Amino acid sequence: MSISQATLSDRTEGGIGSEFWRGMRSCTPVLLGIVPYALVLGAQAAQKGLSPVEVPLMTGLNFAGGSEFAAIQLWTSPPHVLLIVAITFLVNSRHLLMGAALAPFLRHLPRRKVFPALFLMCDESWALGLADARKRAAAGIGPAFSLPYYAGASIPFYLAWVVFTGLGAALGPVLGDVEAYGFDMAFPAVFLVLLAGMWKGVAAARPWLVSLVVAALVYLLVPGAWYVAAGALSGLVAAYFLAGDA
């Protein structure tokens, strides 16, 4: 669906509020998809001995689902803190590239606004915010990055993630193995939807293929979470060398 300049512009009367609600509307379909795997994470954390208070503290302070799943898989009593910290950094290393992709659109904002915005950045809000900024730039609307839109798209993700991981921890002992209900399929399904929204053709998708192949090979051949960094870096290198051919 094309977005008209009248819809995108946040310079009209009540623009900030309308942009915030536009962000909330755009995130709703994906938001519904993260609820199941938030419950899965919470239930898995409860099975590892974390309480319904500790789980939302973890997910609220480290707002990054992939690293939290990895941390829970490594959780022991007592936990190997240095190992968990290292894996968390490795899995979250993709955020360096995600932030770099957003950086050109954030230059007009003061740091006191940029840093909270980046704290709320997850895969879903990043994809929505970047796609919207590109559409606004193509429509000649400035600034291309709408902070109210981004806030409307990212704050619900944060709140839902914290609340439903906590709920999963509380209900985990009752539900048992929540993966038996198929909730774990929500995670790849959400990312397939995000990729579909960013699709620009086969030529532009070649770095995705390179990243996928490299990440899969590293996953099969190298222990640990190195496949995350390998996939991200190989995709970046491929995008650099293939940019002129796209």
Image (tube, rainbow, N blue to C red):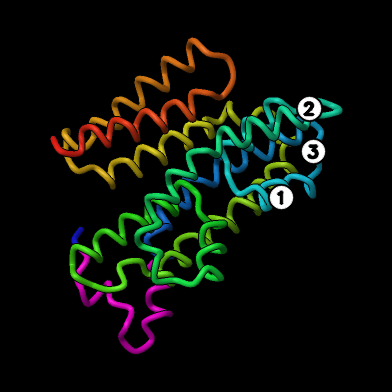
Q: Earlier in the sequence, mark 3 or mark 2?
A: 3
Q: Is residue 198 above or below residue 235?
A: below
Residue appearing at x 28%, y 47% in the figure = 197
* Image quadrant containing the C terminus: top left
For disc 2, the neighbor class at 10 Å (few under 14, some 14 to 19, many from 20) is few
Residue at mark 2: 80
Tell me residue 21's x, y (percent): 42, 72
Q: Is residue 163 left or right of residue 26?
A: right
Q: Are marks 1 and 2 in contact (CB under 8 Å)?
A: no
Which of disc 1 and disc 3 is earlier in sequence?
Answer: 3
Quick one: label 1 or label 2, which is nearer the N terminus?
Answer: 1
Image quadrant of residue 191? Answer: top left
In magenta, the rendered stretch is 3-23
Type of residue at label 1? Pro
Tell whether 30 sits left or right of 43.
left
Mark 3, residue position: 50
Q: Is residue 201 left or right of residue 151?
A: left
Nearest to the observer: residue 80 or residue 150: 80
View extreme (bottom): residue = 13
Distance, label 1 to label 2, CA atoms, is 20 Å
Is 53 drawn above or below residue 202 in the view shown? Answer: below
Q: Is residue 69 visible?
A: yes
Label 3 – label 2 distance at C-alpha: 15 Å
Q: Is residue 114 above or below residue 119?
A: below
Measured as percent of width and height from the top left, residue 29 is found at: 40, 53
Residue type, mark 3 in image: Leu
| Discs 1/2, front | 2
- x then y, percent, for residue 230: 45, 26
Rendered location of residue 67, percent (x, y)? 60, 36
Given residues 90 and 183, the one toward you in this image is 90
Q: Which residue is mark 1?
A: 56
